[in-house]
Structures are given as structure tokens and as C-alpha cells.
Amino acid sequence: MTSLILALTAGAIVGLALGALGGGGSILAVPALLYLLDFTPVAATTASLIIVAVTTATSLYAHARDGNVHWRTGILFGTAGLVPALLAGTLASKLPQGLLTAAFSLIALAAALRILRPARTATNQHQSARPGRAAAAGAGLGTLTGLLGVGGGFLTVPTLVGTVGLRMKAAVGTSLLVITMTSLTALAARTGTAHGLHWGIIAPFTGAAILGSWDGRRLASKVSGRTLQYAFAVVLIAVAAVMLADAVL
């Protein structure tokens, strides 16, 4: 019963982050699975991919219905990350668990610092995507997704705003398309690590995340975006410190 309550609570928080910020859910999902629900690093990152893929696909439908998804840009960005996600997902199960934990903590810290930087705004409603930069960013995102189970919305959204020129709502919606593509690809590469997963935890976690994502969208309309981002960055810094200490001590 305690594990179920923890899964529901953590899932709701992950969903709130995804719904309000368009990303960041997996950076909370992995440590929650590791430290609250006793998953191994490999199992936690695999479970995170399942949770993020299902939750983002659900949120993607809502954003697409509202016209906030630029399909051509998202497919270009996401396709560039498919092969890196597949290769990194295969490699993840062969790396030392301490290394995965340390790498994840550094990514969480980098995400927090990225969030704390002043946001760039698009000068045009939508510029032509720069294929080279978009492909490089997509490949980097795919690698992180496959290796660490990180959806990468914290990287995708600012890239879509700064490089492609999407407005924030469109960047958030398009980011969900990219995350869904790379997460499903990385998950396909991890089929061999799925046999030991605790589905009695993953299912309620995912359900709570889906419901939380809808609440997150409503929260974003009532609270300043920068306020949400700063609060999330503080949480990420704390998570990064705990995970890095766990990896090196």
C-alpha cells in the first residue's frame, strides 16, 4: 500500500511538470523510481521511458487539438534522434549502474542551470528550421533519451524557440511530439530489460502522471511561467546533489 501511494504521488508530480513546463517529468521520474520505489538504475530509466512515452502521447493529443504542434518541424527534429536513441538504449544496460546515476545527476544539474538562464523569445511566429542545427540537437536529445531515460523537454523547448523560432506554446506542443518519438524508439531498444519491471507500480504511476499533466496545463495558465521554472530548477538541483552523492560515496 505504501508503494502504491508513493507511486501515485510521484506520478502526479511528474505529470504536473510535463503539463506545466512541457518537459522535466523524466528527470523527476527516475530518482523517484530509484529512491522511493527501489528500482535499479537500468529498471528506473526503462520504466521512466514507459511513463514518459504514454504521458507525453496523451498530452500531445490535447496540444495537437489546440493547434500547438508543428508536425513538420517536430518530425525533422525527432527523426534525427531515432538512431542515436536506439544505439544508446542498447548501450545503457551494459554500463555500470553507478556511472548511469552519476551521468543522470549531471544532466539534472545542467537542466536546472539551463532553466535558470533568461529565456529567449522568438522574434517571428515561425522561421524556417535550420536543418543542420535541428538535426544535431535532435541527435543529442536521442542519445540522452536512450541512455538515461530522459525525455529531454528541458532541452527541446528552448531549442525550438531559439533555433527554429517557434512561440512557447507551439514549442511545448512540438516538444511532446519529439519526446514521444525518441522515447518509443529508446524503449524498443530496451525490450530485454523490461522483463523485471514492477508493473503494479508503473501502471498507477503512469495513470497519475496522465491526470497530473492535465492539472499542469491548468496550473500553467494561473501561475507565472518563470515562477514554475525557478521552483522546478531548485528541485532539480536538490535531486542532482542527492544522486551525485549516491554515485560517488
Image (tube, rainbow, N blue to C red):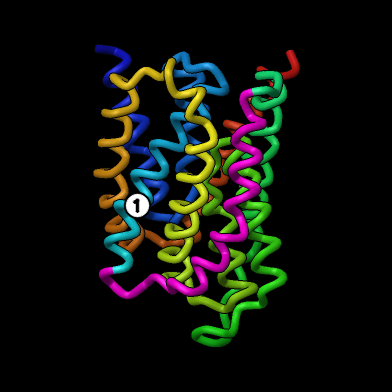
Q: Is residue 37 magenta?
A: no
**From the viewer's perspective, is residue 160 above or below residue 154?**
below
- Report the quarter where the N terminus lies: top left
Residue, far right: 248
The residue at 41%/36% (across/down) is 50
Q: Magenta span covers which residues?
A: 65-93
Between 117 and 106, the one lying in front of the other is 106
Residue depicted at 45% across the width and 63% down the height: 172
Residue 25 as seen in the image, left or right of residue 57: right
In the displayed structure, would residue 197 be above or below residue 178? above
The answer to whether residue 193 is visible is yes
User: Is 106 on the left-hand or right-hand side of 212?
Assistant: right
- Percent across and percent down for residue 148 are 60, 35
Q: Amino acid at mark 1?
A: Ala
Q: Is residue 130 left or right of residue 121?
A: right
Residue 25, horizontal then vertical, whole percent: 45, 43
Residue 67: quarter of image = bottom left
From the viewer's perspective, tell me whether residue 9 is left or right of residue 229: left
Main SS, magenta residues: helix
- Find residue 233 and report its horizontal and vertical position in percent: 56, 46
- When the figure is inspected, residue 78 is found, relative to residue 126, above or below; the finding is above
Secondary structure of residue under mark 1: helix
Indicate yes or no whether the magenta region holds residue 90.
yes
**Quarter assignment of residue 158:** bottom right
Label 1: few (<14), some (14–19) or many (≥20) C-alpha neighbours in 10 Å? some
> Can you give x and y, in whole percent of width and height, for residue 18 in the image?
40, 49
The residue wearing badge 1 is 57
Residue at x 68% of width, y 52% of height? 140
